[in-house]
Image: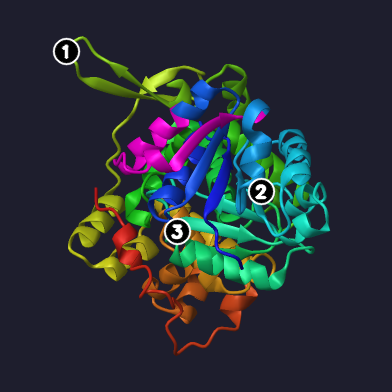
Amino acid sequence: MKEIKTVTILGANGSMGSGSAAILAGFGGMKVYMLARTLEKAKEGITKAVKSIRSDVIIEQMIPGTYESDLEVAIENSDWVFELLAEDYAVKESMLQKINKYKKPGTVVSTVSSGLSISRLAANLDEDGQKNYFGTHFFNPPYKLVLCELVAHPGSDSVLFKEFGGFLETKLRRVVVYTEDKPAFAGNRVGFQLMNEVAQYAKQYADKGGIALMDEILSGYTGRAMGPLATVNFVGLDVHKAIVDNLYETTNDFAHETFKMPEYFEELINAGSLGLKSKVGLYKIEKNADGSKTKFVYNIETREYDICPKFNILFIQEAKAKIGDGDYQGALDIIKNAEGFEAELCRYFLAKYISYSLSLVGEVVETKEMIDMAMGFGFNWVPASALVDLLGGVAAAKEFLKAATVEIPDLLEEAPLDQKFYQINDILDARSLFRSK
């Protein structure tokens, strides 16, 4: 692969575009054309890039411009054209056709997509362009979330694919997960499966606490930075809809029905209540006269917002105490043996997460380590393989899944009983992802 010295960022004013540009300039030392619809927006992107890494030394490496005036010059002079436009086929395909006119032979072209078909997008390029075209799914914000899902398609150059992955790892300091061109790739396929099924269960248990209850049951003590529905609220309900609707339409595995978005999500989206970015969604926060803040949660039954309830679920408190003491396996033992419907729900979702993660090995990724890295570095969730070990090993994990009436994936069914299942502890200490508060 030829050296990449100059990059064009398309979509420079967005949070992903500006954040990625900062990585390219800061870690890669590259010259970066920052293109947006207007010059003002391109300059906004540069400001955001500087803010994301808290250093203005990259300013001199960034050249602002517009699609109308500067596209041809930027692409002709670039070794890599990095497209980060809206998650929409029409938008991306229109831009790819322009890229195809101006790029020089051997130019790497890539897209940030949460799950659009890389093969379909590649068809807008000539033969040389298709060989050098990939999905580069950075996670947001890129400076903090170092995962990149690198996606090939049938026309990709397989040698360049690996070389480009090495470049992303060594030069840009990404953790690279190599995935097949499958719906939502690896991380989002697993993550949004769990989040959407949790949303379905929130409706089922609306009279017992709904959204807030489900986030409490699956809070930090289960190995994630925030509850699943709080994560949806952070990402945006509209983004969630785009991903799960695509998965519901394009997949047909045992989790298919869990990708059907609940109606109350649709109602919130139609009302413009998209989550954090619109300041109201599944949750909202209001400032009080004294300067304090009150957190509210959406009541699925009344369609109003209630003050977030405080729960006192004994097994959760006991598990958190174990984590606070550094006894992670002890925390899982408490979860395994606790009584009550909350504990049953917790066990079901942990089992489903393990099952679905491992079921994608062979279809979406080659090894379970790729799925583990996707979830650990992309979502800050404890990887499935680490949970297998913390549950007591392969035999104990199989019993755990069986008791939760969850399908045991072939990979787990056939795994040796006398070996550690989690193999990337040198890259990611999964214990760091548990929260005791």
Q: Upstream in the sequence, badge 2 or badge 1?
A: 2
Q: Splitting the image into 4 quarters, where does residue 377 fall?
A: bottom left
Which of label 2 and label 3 is nearer to you? 3
Q: Splitting the image into 4 quarters, where does residue 370 fall?
A: bottom right
Q: Distance between the residues labelled 2 and 1?
A: 45 Å
Q: What element carries label 1?
A: loop
Q: Which residue is drawn at 60% across and 77% down?
A: 411
Q: Residue at x 68, y 63 (%)?
A: 180
Say what amino acid the circle numbered 1 marks. Asp
Say what amino acid the circle numbered 3 marks. Leu
Q: What element carries label 3?
A: loop
Q: Upstream in the sequence, badge 1 or badge 3?
A: 3
Q: Distance between the residues labelled 2 and 3?
A: 22 Å
For label 1, the residue is 290
Residue 186, x across and y down, in percent: 60, 58
Is residue 16 one of those drawn in magenta? no
Q: Image height check: is 241 above or below 395?
A: above
For label 3, the residue is 172
Q: Upstream in the sequence, badge 2 or badge 3?
A: 2
Is residue 64 one of those drawn in magenta? yes
Q: Residue at x 29, y 40 (%)?
A: 54
| Magenta highlight range | 44-67
